[in-house]
Image: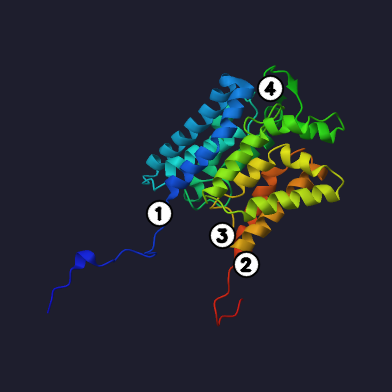
């Protein structure tokens, strides 16, 4: 009898079919997709604000990840540190350019330690870490998170959404598209975010359901409430949320119908908070609320196995 070559027998855990892409590649694509928004932030708000907020946020996110892994003697898995870079970058781009130096550090600590590692690390967090960090900062230090400046001049002013709420003259669509408005570092240039979003879609890093449902439902509700849907989509952080935050693999549904319902919920909640809430912007809390519904959406929309009765 021929001897069995055990070295060729697959004994590893399932799954045994693997894609040609891993977490590192996915995170690198996300980083690439954020380059246009980062360039716009650098151009409109200057290198000092950019390096202070983005540099400290990304560096501290990676550092906190490293410290937690060493402290609890965990081995980093594929994508651990690149995901920390993405978290730090996303958090930084949602912060005002005038943020004190300690704001991005505290935000990164909350994002990595509390929102990510507390739940077991990459792939286990129920809420988007960058948004958790921003939400805690917004609630704890609202003045620092709602103080914005005009590009180039540095003059303190309100954001377009605040102008809209207070019935003040609004910026043109051209300024909203290019980014020549007050706002968070990476959320002012709509065209930069759209370019990054298209890259993610064309590279199949994300699927179309969540962005389409998010933006579509937000536009429809805006129109229903008598607001300008184009303005609502171009102003604030809705494009950042639709393409980069709500599409997070870990905290959003995996089923097509789940993605659509998730995106619709995000869009409706965003506009509802903008219109009836205490803050002119609702993206952060809308996505975090829908993150909590992700398990239920997956259970409700997961294809039923043939011959089995759904409980």
* Marks 3 and 4 in Cβ contact (< 8 Å): no
Q: Residue furthest bottom?
A: 307
Look at discs 1 and 4 and give the one toward the viewer: 1
As helix, strand or loop, the secondary structure at mark 3 comes to loop
Residue at position x 39%, y 44% from top?
72
Along the polypeptide, which appears first: circle 4 or circle 2? Answer: 4
Query: Residue 280, which numbered label?
Result: none
Along the polypeptide, which appears first: circle 3 or circle 4? Answer: 4
The answer for how far apart the CA atoms under marks 1 and 4 are is 42 Å
**222 with respect to 30 (left or right):** right
Residue 144 drawn at (x, y percent) = 68, 27
As helix, strand or loop, the secondary structure at mark 2 comes to helix
* Marks 1 and 3 in Cβ contact (< 8 Å): no
Residue 69 drawn at (x, y percent) = 40, 42
The answer for how far apart the CA atoms under marks 3 and 4 are is 39 Å
Q: Which residue position is annotated with label 2?
A: 301
Q: Which residue position is annotated with label 1?
A: 20
* Marks 2 and 1 in Cβ contact (< 8 Å): no
* Marks 3 and 2 in Cβ contact (< 8 Å): no
Look at discs 4 and 2 and give the one toward the viewer: 4
**153 with respect to 6 (left or right):** right
Along the polypeptide, which appears first: circle 3 or circle 2? Answer: 3
Residue at position x 60%, y 63% from top?
298
Q: Can see residue 268?
A: no
Q: Which residue position is annotated with label 3?
A: 254
Q: Which residue position is annotated with label 4?
A: 151
The answer for how far apart the CA atoms under marks 4 and 2 are is 45 Å
Residue at position x 63%, y 22% from top?
45
């Amino acid at each position: 009898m021929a001897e069995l070559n055990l070295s060729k027998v697959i004994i590893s855990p399932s799954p045994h079919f693997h894609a040609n892409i891993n977490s590192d590649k996915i995170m690198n694509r996300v980083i690439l997709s954020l380059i246009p928004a980062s360039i716009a932030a650098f151009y409109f708000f200057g290198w000092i604000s950019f390096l202070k907020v983005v540099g400290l946020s990304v560096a501290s996110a990676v550092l906190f990840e490293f410290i937690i892994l060493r402290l609890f003697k965990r081995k980093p898995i594929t994508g651990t540190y690149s995901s920390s870079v993405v978290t730090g970058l996303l958090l930084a781009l949602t912060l005002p350019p005038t943020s004190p130096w300690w704001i991005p550090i505290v935000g990164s600590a909350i994002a990595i330690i509390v929102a990510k590692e507390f739940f077991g690390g990459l792939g286990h967090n129920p809420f988007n870490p960058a948004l958790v960090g921003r939400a805690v900062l917004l609630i704890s230090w609202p003045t620092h998170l709602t103080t914005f400046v005009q590009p180039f001049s540095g003059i303190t002013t309100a954001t377009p959404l605040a102008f809209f709420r207070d019935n003040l003259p609004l910026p043109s669509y051209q300024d909203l598209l290019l980014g020549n408005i007050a706002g968070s570092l990476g959320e002012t240039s709509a065209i930069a975010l759209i370019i990054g979003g298209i890259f993610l879609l064309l590279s199949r890093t994300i699927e179309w359901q969540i962005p389409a449902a998010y933006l579509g439902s937000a536009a429809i509700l805006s129109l229903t409430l008598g607001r300008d849907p184009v303005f609502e989509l171009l102003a604030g952080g809705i494009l950042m949320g639709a393409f980069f935050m709500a599409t997070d693999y870990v905290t959003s549904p995996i089923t097509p119908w789940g993605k659509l319902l998730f995106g619709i919920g995000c869009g409706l909640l965003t506009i509802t908070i903008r219109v009836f809430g205490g803050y002119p912007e609702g993206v952060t809390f809308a996505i975090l609320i829908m993150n909590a519904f992700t398990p239920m959406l997956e259970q409700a929309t997961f294809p039923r196995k043939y011959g089995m009765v759904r409980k």
